[in-house]
Image (spheres, rainbow, N blue to C red):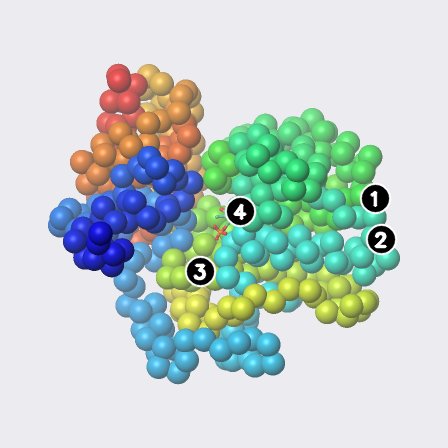
Amino acid sequence: MATPLQRFEEDWRAFERRHVWHPYASMSHPLPAEPVVRAAGARLRLENGTELIDGMASWWCVIHGYNHPALNAAAREQLEQMSHVMFGGLTHRPAARLAALLLELAPPGLEHVFFSDSGSVSVEVAIKMALQYWHARGLPGKQRLLAVRGGYHGDTFGAMSVCDPIGGMHHMFRHVLPQHFFAPRPECSGGADFDPADAAAIGAILADHHDEIAALVIEPIVQGAGGMHIYCPGYLKRLRDLCDAHGVLLVLDEIATGFGRTGTMFACEHAGVAPDIMCVGKALTGGYMSLAATLCTREVAEGISGAAPGAFMHGPTFMANPLACAVAGASIDLLRQGDWRQRVAGIEVQIASGLAPCRALPGVSDVRSLGALGVVELDRDVDPAWMQQEFVRRGVWVRPFRNLVYIMPPYVISGEELDRLTTAIAEVVEAFAAR
Ligand SMILES: *Cc1c(COP(=O)(O)O)cnc(C)c1O
C-alpha cells in the first residue's frame, strides 16, 4: 500500500481530490478544481498552459492584480527583516505604519485599530468590542445583536450568528448559536430613492429592544455572499440615525466593500455615514495573504479600557503579522496614488453596458452593478460544475454561487479583458437557459 506522500508523487491531483477539503465542498463528491501554477495582472495560468481572465479577484481580494511588483518588493523586503514576531509585549513599524494608513483613509471618528488574521475573526472582535463596551458602561443587559436578512459576515460562530438566518447555517447549529434580532432586508435597490417605510421594521425592533441590543451589524450598500444585493444609501443613513437615537452601536462590515470596490474607498461613504466599529479584510493586503482589522472610535476604546477587566479580551497568535502588515501598507500606498478611482469608474461603466444585454435573456431575473462589481441573477440555481467548465472553455474565470453569476475583477483589468468576461457571461447564461 502506497504512503500518502508516494500517492501524492504519483498523481498529486488525484491525491488532492481525495484528501483536501475545498470551501463549502463535499469530500465524497468533490467538484472539479482547476490547477493554477502562476498568476499575473488579471490572469491565471493553469497547469496545462490555459490562461484565464480573472473575474473574481480571488473573492474581492486581488484589487491591484496578481504578482504586483510593488507588493512583491514589500514582501521581499520585510521577509529579510522578519516574517513574524508575537505582538504581545513586542511591536514593529509595519503595524504602526499600516494603522496610520488605515486611519488616513477611514471614515471620521475611527481612531483605534485591532489587527487579526481573517475577516471572520475581525467580526468576532467587533462583536466582542460592542458587548464589552456596554458591559463596561454598566449596561450588561445590552448583549444581543441586530442584523439584517441577506447578510454574510463569516463562518465562525459569532459571525455566523449574524448571517442570514435562512441562507446561513442557523438551522444546523441552532442549539449553539446565540439568538439575535433580524430585520427584513432593505427593499430599496441601489439607484432607488429611500422610502422611510423600508426601515420601519428595523426601527420598531430598535424601539422595543434597544435595552437588550448592543450593536447593529450590517454590510454597507452591498450585501455580498448573502445574495449580492445592492441597497440605497438612504437606508444606511437612516440606520445611523436610529442607532444614535436608541443608544446602539453601528458596526459596518466593509470586508468585501472596502478599498474602492464600490467606487468609493469605503462603501459607507456613499451614505456619508461613519460607524462606531468597522471591519476590514479581504483586499487589505491586495490579496497577498490573510489579514484583517477592526477599527473603533475613541468612545468605544475608552469605554472598554476604563472598566474591569481593564483590557480588551482578545489576542490572536498571528496578530499584526509583520509580513502581512508590510504588504498591506504597500497596497494602501498604491491606492493613495489614486488611479483606482478612474479605473473603477471605467470598470463600472463597462460592466453596466457589458451586462445590460443579459437583461433580455431567458432565465435572467435581474442585472445590477456598482463600481467594479456586476451581478446577473437567474431564476434558478446554477449547476456550478457545468458553468465552471463553460467559463474555463471561454478562457475566463467566473465562479457563480446559488443563482448568481457575478464578477468583481482586479482594478487593473483591461477594457478588452473585461469585454471578454461580460461576453462570456452573456453566452454562458444563454446556454444555461437552453439546457
Ligand atoms: C468574506 C467576508 C467575511 C469573512 O471573511 P473571511 O476572511 O473569509 O473570514 C466577512 N464579512 C464579509 C462581508 C465578507 O465578504
For residue 139, the mark is 2
- At numbered mark 3, what does the secondary structure look like: helix, strand or loop? loop
- Return the residue at label 3: 290
CA gap between label 4 and label 2 equals 27 Å
Going by the numbered disc 4, the residue's amino acid type is Gly
Q: Is residue 144 left or right of residue 66?
A: right
CA gap between label 1 and label 3 equals 36 Å
Instruction: Name which of mark 1 and mark 3 comes first in the sequence.
Output: 1
Ligand 1 neighbours mark 4 (CB distance < 8 Å): yes
Q: Residue at x 71, y 33 (%)?
A: 202
Q: In the rendered view, would you say 306 is above or below 247?
A: below
Q: How many marks?
A: 4
CA gap between label 4 and label 1 equals 26 Å
- The location of residue 176, given as percent across then percent down, is 65, 42
For residue 211, the mark is 1
- The location of residue 328, given as percent across then percent down, is 44, 66
Q: Residue at x 54, y 63 (%)?
A: 116
Q: Is residue 312 left or right of residue 334?
A: right
